[in-house]
Amino acid sequence: MRHDVSRTTWPRRLAVAAPALAVLVAAAACGAPAAQRPMRAPAQPASSGVGAPIRLVGPQRVLVIPVRLPDVAPQRSMQQITGKVRRVAEWVQQASYGKASIEATTLDWQPLPHPLETYRVSQYNFQVDRTRVRRLVEDALAAASRSTRVADFPFVYIVVGAHTEPGTGYGMIAYCANPGMLTGVRRGRLELERLALPGGGSYAGGVVVTAENAHPGHVVHDLLHALGGAKDGKRPVPDLYDYELQSNPPKGERMTPELFSIHTGPWDIMSHHFIRMDETPPPPPSSFIRRQLGWIDDAQVVTVRPGETREVTLAPLESGQSPLVVRIPLGTARYLLVENRQPSGLGAVLPSSGMLVLEVNEDREEGTDIVRTIDANPSVPKLAHAPFQPGSGERRAHVSASDGVAVAPLALERDGRLRLVVTTPDRASATGGVRRAP
């Protein structure tokens, strides 16, 4: 039996949700280099970086394969699984401003031939055994092939019927297998793996794996990796959390999202998988990820170069209107993105609002600080109050003498639009309205 997902369930607008950034759950891993034992993150090679942007629009066909193990009974019903898939589809529709959609076909439970221990993987990225990942994926594809033409689907989402917490059950609650755990994501030589199908065929589409109790944010996070695919040996949709902290957490620390989302914080789904472990939608993507997926057009971006002074009024990022982002180029692969974050749409789950400044360096390696959130209120932990507010906050503006740039919020309009100014540090200081960050 198949379950086709065509309806969405999350409301278009949500009430403002209070932040809860310390929920005990297993963190989703997303394809860091796999290994057999603990290891330090590899040194950054010259070929590191982010894949070129793609244009992901229109319906995306996803085959959902729930798999049942012979020695473990699933605790989630098919209704719960299809409901989660609908919430993921709704998130994609909202995050893409209606430009992309998920067309999911969900199979009933498919039996796997081996017990859980045969497939179990580590909860830590650098310790995942990719041979076990391949075994699970190929066994799931083989089971689905008995009733479905798998090759008709560009993307596959495998749901493991085993309740999983950090280091228990399946071991890891979520990951992207292809591109990801099966391919590795560093060194700039990424290619999608070909996976064996019964009868001698192969499958080289995107593959996501989660445990049955994964949050929709886990699914969304890894699905975006799969949807982005591989380009020029790199992932256009990279991880923005810290691989080193995920694989080598401080002793005694519980595995929570904020433990390793130290670079971007809760301001992007690729950094922080969810805000609350309930029915609340996951956090939205930043303008960086939206531009990588072709969801923000060039016409919605205002470019201001260092040395220029320009006032800009930005629409809220979740509105999809114009303009949505200011881009300040600082080099061939480095730039600032300035956004207007307001508590509407998917942004209602975020802990604060205002002018968010992101420093992007596309030459940095996955699992490091590709996107670094500039913190307006560093005394508040976890980047929770990072946005700049007009006339308030520990830091009234982002001022960088080395880059020759200053950015300050001026006023929040009644319709949610934000007026800001991009200028030079000297001009900002001369006005007396900008306080330099220490």
Image (cartoon, helix red, strand yellow):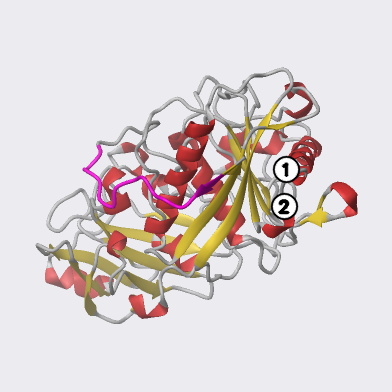
Q: Is residue 24 left or right of residue 116?
A: left
Q: Is residue 72 left or right of residue 273?
A: right
Q: Residues within 10 Å of mark 1 (few under 14, many from 20)?
A: many
Which residue appears farthest toward the left when viewing the image? 414
Q: Which residue is more in the foreground, 415 or 58?
A: 58
Image quarter hosting the N terminus? top right
Distance between the Cα atoms at labels 1 and 2?
Answer: 7 Å
Q: Quadrant of residue 277?
A: top left
Q: Position of residue 136 (x, y in %)?
A: 75, 36
The magenta stretch spans which residues? 3-17
The label number, if any, that marks residue 179 in the structure image: none
Q: Which residue is more in the foreground, 73 or 409?
A: 73
Q: Is residue 273 above or below residue 306?
A: above
Magenta-colored stretch includes residue 401? no
Q: Is residue 113 visible?
A: yes
Q: Main secondary structure of the magenta part?
A: loop
Asked which secondary structure carries label 2, the reply is: helix
Q: Pointers 1 and 2 in contact (CB under 8 A)? A: yes
Q: Which residue is more in the foreground, 156 or 350?
A: 156
The label number, if any, that marks residue 144 in the structure image: 1
Name the amino acid, label 2: Val
Q: Is residue 314 above or below residue 182?
A: below
Q: Position of residue 113 (x, y in %)?
A: 80, 28
Which residue carries the number 2 mark?
150
Which residue is depicted at the point 81% across and 38% down?
Answer: 131
Q: Position of residue 31 (x, y in %)?
A: 65, 46
Name the amino acid, label 1: Ala
